């Protein structure tokens, strides 16, 4: 059983991926993510070929990597708080 176009559309929202159909209801669905240069265009045919699934998953990975880089870094334990004073 292969992926149908409904599968990546439903996965997209939970992973920061936007999707749209170009123009007047074209035969493809376009997937993109903020701050990720690549887009993925998936034909609306059933089942979706594995190469398109791999490209879609790579887009999700790139979006997650970008989101992690943009998150503020957590500092380690505040050493001043736990530093013992010298006698």
Image (cartoon, rainbow, N blue to C red):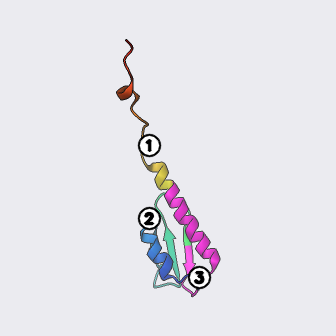
> Which mark sits nearer the N-terminus, 1 or 2?
2
Q: Residues within 10 Å of mark 3 (few under 14, many from 20)?
A: some
Residue drawn at the location 42% of the way across and 70% of the way down: 13
- Residue shown at 63%/81% (left/top)? 49
Q: Which residue is mark 3?
A: 48
Q: Give the mark nearest the N terminus, 3 or 1.
A: 3
Which residue is most to the right?
51
Q: Residue at x 51, y 82 (%)?
A: 5
Decide if residue 57 is on the left or right side of residue 68.
Answer: right
Q: Earlier in the sequence, mark 2 or mark 3?
A: 2
Q: Is residue 41 visible?
A: yes
Rounded to the nearest whole Å, what is the CA distance between mark 1 and mark 2?
A: 20 Å
Q: Are marks 2 and 3 in contact (CB under 8 Å)?
A: no
Marker count (numbered): 3
Residue 14: quadrant of the picture: bottom left
**Is residue 20 in view from this perspective?**
no
Q: Looking at the rendered structure, which numbered label has been put on residue 73?
A: 1
Q: Which residue bears the numbered disc 2?
A: 16
**Residue 6 image offset from top left, x and y in percent:** 47, 82
Residue closer to the observer: 34 or 23:
34
Q: Are marks 3 and 1 in contact (CB under 8 Å)?
A: no
Residue 43's x, y, as percent? Answer: 57, 82
Report the span colored magenta.
41-65
């Amino acid at each position: 059983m292969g992926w149908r176009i409904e599968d990546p559309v439903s996965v997209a929202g939970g992973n920061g991926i936007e999707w749209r159909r170009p123009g007047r209801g074209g035969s493809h669905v376009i997937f993109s993510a903020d701050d990720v240069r690549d887009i993925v265009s998936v034909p609306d045919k059933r089942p979706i070929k594995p190469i398109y699934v791999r490209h879609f998953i790579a887009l999700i990975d790139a979006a997650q990597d970008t989101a992690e880089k943009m998150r503020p870094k957590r500092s380690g334990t505040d050493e001043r708080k736990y530093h013992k004073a010298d006698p």
